[in-house]
Amino acid sequence: MKPSARLSLALAATCLALGTGCASLAGGPPGDPLEPMNRKVFGFNEQVQTRLLAPVSRAWLRVTSEAARDGIHHLMRNLGSPVTLVNDLLQGELRRAGGTFARFLVNTTLGVGGIYEMGESFGLEHHEEDFGQTLAVWGVPPGPYLVLPLLGSSSPRAGVGMFVDSSFSPWGLLIDQPVRIGLSAVDAIDSYARVMDRLDGLRETSVDYYAAIRSLYLQDREQEIRNGRGEDVPEAMGIDYDVDLSAGGP
């Protein structure tokens, strides 16, 4: 099991075990009773982002071409398809599951492993599902908002989902660990580079940056669970700092 998944599961299990104890902690609004602790972890993540991830991401943009970055981005999305497929099926979304499977086949063959985005040419739009979303469809409540070290915005339900998803992916058996670490590290850098400017803008214009990130994450997460059905909400700008040591995909 990857260290990040162990950490996420441990924090989620602790909060679930505390039950009403989590909700009784002072200082946080409804939905964020752990706000004092969350803000400290958020501050730590901000230091990692500012001192490490941002400089590395800027260097990444300087030394790589847009075509190379897009190829890596498409490849990592394609590697995440098996997790999405399993969760589509668990949610009873058979039409979406069929689209996920067809997209994976097209991108893996015509797209040279997924480096080239060919699925959209066949009307197969990309979407992602995870076990945290599946638990929501099954009626499991999210629990309180959590900010996890390095991983960012989450919840007990999402943390448990992250752990379960790591067992869905076949890449842990098919790809050597050093390669998985390298791919995931590059993917994390590229993913951050893609939202870095938007995050800087949000940071500069927000009265409370922590509260802004929390609100956007919760709204975006709800929209993901509904599979885009219902009212549109702003895109969340939370950052996933996870370097996946086992799944080989996002």
Image (cartoon, rainbow, N blue to C red):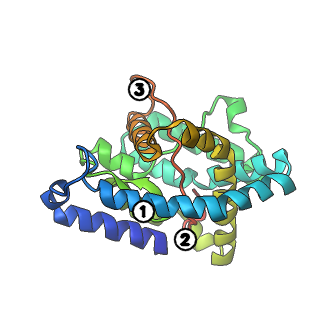
How far, Cα to Cα, is label 1 from label 3? 32 Å
Q: Nearer the viewer, residue 188 or 92?
A: 188
Q: Residue at left 42%, top 49%?
A: 87
* Mark in the foreground, 1 or 3: 1
Instruction: Say if residue 61 shows up in the picture.
Output: yes
Indicate the position of residue 160 as horizontal and vertical percent values. 34, 61
Q: Residue at left 50%, top 39%?
A: 236
Rendered view: 154 above or below 248? above
Residue under label 3, please give it. 229
Q: Quadrant of residue 245?
A: bottom right
Query: Element under label 2?
Result: loop
Q: Earlier in the sequence, mark 1 or mark 3?
A: 1
Indicate the position of residue 204 as horizontal and vertical percent values. 58, 40
| CA neighbours of label 1 inside 10 A, class few (<14), some (14 to 19), many (20+) | some
Amino acid marked by disc 3: Arg
- Horizontally, is 189 left or right of 20 in the view? right
Amino acid marked by disc 2: Ser
Residue under label 1, please give it. 41
Query: Element under label 1?
Result: helix
- Horizontally, is 107 left or right of 15 in the view? right
Tag shown at residue 246: 2
Rendered view: 218 above or below 184? above
